Image (spheres, helix red, strand yellow):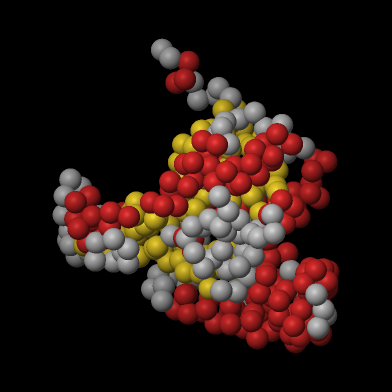
Amino acid sequence: MKLGSFKFLPRSFLGVDIGTSSIKVVELSRWGTRKSLKNYGEIRSAVLYDKPFRTAEKSSLLLSSKDIARALRAIVEEAKIETKEAIFSIPDFSSFFTRFELPEMTPEELPEAVQYEARKHVPLPFAEVTFDWQILNRKRLGSAKEPIKILMVAVPNELINQYQEIAHLAKIKLTALEAEVFGLIRSSLNEEKSSAVILDMGAQTTTINVVDQGILQSSRSIDIGGGSLSERISQSLSIDRIKAEEKKMGEGLSSKELKTVLTPMLDTLVTEIVRATQNFKGKEIQKVIVGGGSALLPGLLPYLAESLQKETELIDPFRSIFYSPVLEDTIKEMGPSYAVAVGMALRGLE
């Protein structure tokens, strides 16, 4: 018997999230069923460069693979991370999600049918993308009365090649790539089977994900993020971006002035959430989970809860992970922005 067959042997894995304004790394370990936080680190693009790592306007990274690998190595060395195996997240705005239906067929026929149908939906030349798919109604598979519902995600090969080069230059073993949303689902819902909307509020965009029974039903990104909220404050109050950011995260919606300034953008977000849930023909959405760096905007959760009339909570990716009690306050503050990286590392431990 090989030693590797013992489930209780310790194992460590890295989750890497290359965002628009920062790179985050989480190192998790597992001993039996217990998962622990070994290490974490983050570096912001502003520390090294005068522009972000990426932009939502393009699927490719703005900086060279060499520059991003340098930043990633800086995190690994500063945090003294020893684990080499990693899973990288792919931003949702760099991925193409689509749903389609297929008639009942055998499991052997399905892969070829999916590939044939996928060509009709992907907006890029098929040779330029890599795609993956899953069955949304697996429990009903085999029912002649119901077609097979497929969720497909396609990613440009150019981006995949960039990530492979970054991992190579950073001397990290890249074992898989995964769309951000699947990491969010893994780190936020765990074993829960409720229907939920998971918001990922990043620096440039917010992704609205509708999830049922732990399975992604729809995903779309809108151009409202922490940066656009800060820009609105900066323009409305005639202050620079740094002061606008400080005011946003310090006062938030508790300030009548800021609430007046930000309400139009937040109402647009609410409208898009309602639209996404209306298009979901499953059971009623039970709650809204908010993650991403902008999730900590003071007053945001009560505002969304009142506007949507739904239970609204902050994402807590570390809730099932053991960590030192001295990190309690730090974990609460960093949790929402580290949800994707945690989700990637959790996949590695599965």
**Left or right, 62 with reference to 236:** left
Q: Quadrant of residue 202?
A: bottom right
Vertical position of residue 310 compared to residue 142: above or below: below
**Left or right, 212 with reference to 21:** left
- In the rendered image, residue 55, in percent from the top left (x then y), is placed at 56, 63
Look at the image and tell me whether residue 28 can be seen: yes
- In this rendered view, identify the residue nearer to me: 192 or 113: 113
Residue at x 16% of width, y 54% of height: 105
- In the rendered image, residue 53, in percent from the top left (x then y), is placed at 61, 56
- In this rendered view, identify the residue nearer to me: 266 or 306: 266
Residue at x 65% of width, y 48% of height: 24
- In the rendered image, residue 88, in percent from the top left (x then y), is placed at 52, 45
Look at the image and tell me whether residue 106 can be seen: no
Residue at x 51% of width, y 68% of height: 57
Vertical position of residue 336 compared to residue 281: above or below: above
Residue at x 58% of width, y 82% of height: 268
